[in-house]
Image (cartoon, helix red, strand yellow):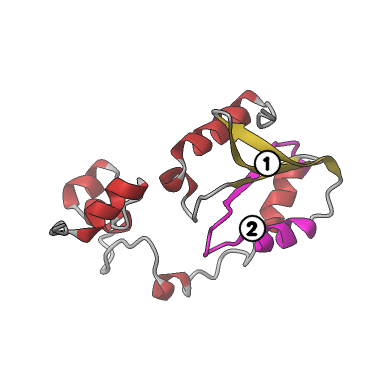
C-alpha cells in the first residue's frame, strides 16, 4: 500500500481529526483581507497572529490566573454556567477541572450520570447549584473539532435550558 503524499490527510480521513487545523487558522487569520474584514490588527502589530504563544501569554498582566472569580460573578448574577471538558484533553484534564470547580463549594443537585448522543454515551455530567459540568467522551482540548455531534448536543441542551439527555 502506497502512503499518501501528505500523511495528515490520511489521519484526517480515518479519525475525522485534522492535525493541521491550527496551521490553517494561523494562515487564514494573518491574511490582510481577512484582518480587514474582521476589523482586526488595526494597530498593525509587529507580530503574526498565532493560536498559542508563550511569549504573548506571558505579557498578560491584566487578568486573573484563574477563571473561578469570573464563574463566581456569573453565578452571583444568576447566570447558568456550563463547563465542559474532553475526557482525553491533555491541556486541561478533567481531573484538574474537577479540582478547580470543587473550590467553588457548590451544592450538588444531580450526581454524576452518563449523557447520550444518538444512543451512545456522549460523556458524563454532574449538576451543581447554578453550574453544570460535563465531560465529552473521546474528545481532546477542542471538543467541537473532535466530537462535533456531542458538542452540538451540549450547545442545544444549554440553549434550551435542559439537562443533558439520560438516554
Question: For residue 88, which quarter of the picture?
Answer: bottom right
Separation of residues labelled 1 and 2 (CA atoms): 17 Å
The quadrant of the image that shows the N terminus is: bottom left
Residue situated in front as seen by the camera: 4 or 8:
4
Residue situated in front as seen by the camera: 59 or 1:
1
Residue situated in front as seen by the camera: 83 or 54:
83
The x, y position of residue 64, in whole percent, is 63, 64
The answer to whether residue 42 shows anywhere in this view is no
Mark 2, residue position: 94
How many numbered tags mark residues here?
2
Q: Does 25 sit left or right of 164 as displayed?
A: left
Q: Residue at x 22, y 46 (%)?
A: 34
The x, y position of residue 108, in whole percent, is 84, 44
Kind of element beneath mark 2: helix
Residue situated in front as seen by the camera: 81 or 146:
146
Q: Does 152 sit left or right of 103 as displayed?
A: left
Q: Which residues are magenta?
A: 76-103
Queried whether the magenta region covers residue 13, the answer comes back as no
Q: Residue furthest right?
A: 107
Queried whether the magenta region covers residue 81, the answer comes back as yes
Neighbour tally class for label 2: few under 14, some 14-19, many 20 plus, Cα within 10 Å:
many
Q: Does 22 sit left or right of 59 as displayed?
A: left
Neighbour tally class for label 1: few under 14, some 14-19, many 20 plus, Cα within 10 Å:
some
Q: Residue at x 66, y 28 (%)?
A: 167
Vertical placement of residue 63 versus 146, above or below: below
Vertical placement of residue 6 versus 53, above or below: above
Kind of element beneath mark 1: strand
Looking at the rendered structure, which numbered label has been put on residue 81?
A: 1
The x, y position of residue 51, in whole percent, is 37, 60
Q: Residue at x 83, y 49 (%)?
A: 106
The x, y position of residue 25, in whole percent, is 29, 53
The answer to whether residue 164 shows anywhere in this view is yes
Amino acid at each position: 500500500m502506497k502512503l499518501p503524499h501528505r500523511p495528515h490527510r490520511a489521519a484526517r480521513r480515518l479519525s475525522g481529526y485534522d492535525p493541521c487545523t491550527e496551521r490553517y487558522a494561523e494562515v487564514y487569520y494573518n491574511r490582510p483581507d481577512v484582518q480587514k474584514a474582521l476589523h482586526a490588527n488595526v494597530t498593525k502589530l509587529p507580530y503574526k497572529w498565532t493560536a498559542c504563544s508563550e511569549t504573548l501569554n506571558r505579557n498578560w498582566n491584566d487578568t486573573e490566573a484563574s477563571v473561578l472569580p469570573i464563574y463566581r460573578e456569573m453565578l452571583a448574577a444568576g447566570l447558568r454556567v456550563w463547563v465542559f471538558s474532553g475526557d482525553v484533553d491533555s491541556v486541561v484534564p478533567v481531573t484538574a477541572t474537577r479540582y478547580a470547580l470543587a473550590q467553588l463549594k457548590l451544592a450538588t443537585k444531580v450526581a454524576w450520570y452518563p449523557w447520550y448522543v444518538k444512543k451512545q454515551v456522549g460523556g458524563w455530567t454532574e449538576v451543581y447549584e447554578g453550574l453544570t459540568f460535563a465531560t465529552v467522551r473521546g474528545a481532546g482540548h477542542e471538543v467541537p473539532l473532535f466530537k462535533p455531534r456531542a458538542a452540538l448536543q451540549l450547545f442545544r441542551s444549554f440553549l434550551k435550558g435542559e439537562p443533558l439527555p439520560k438516554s
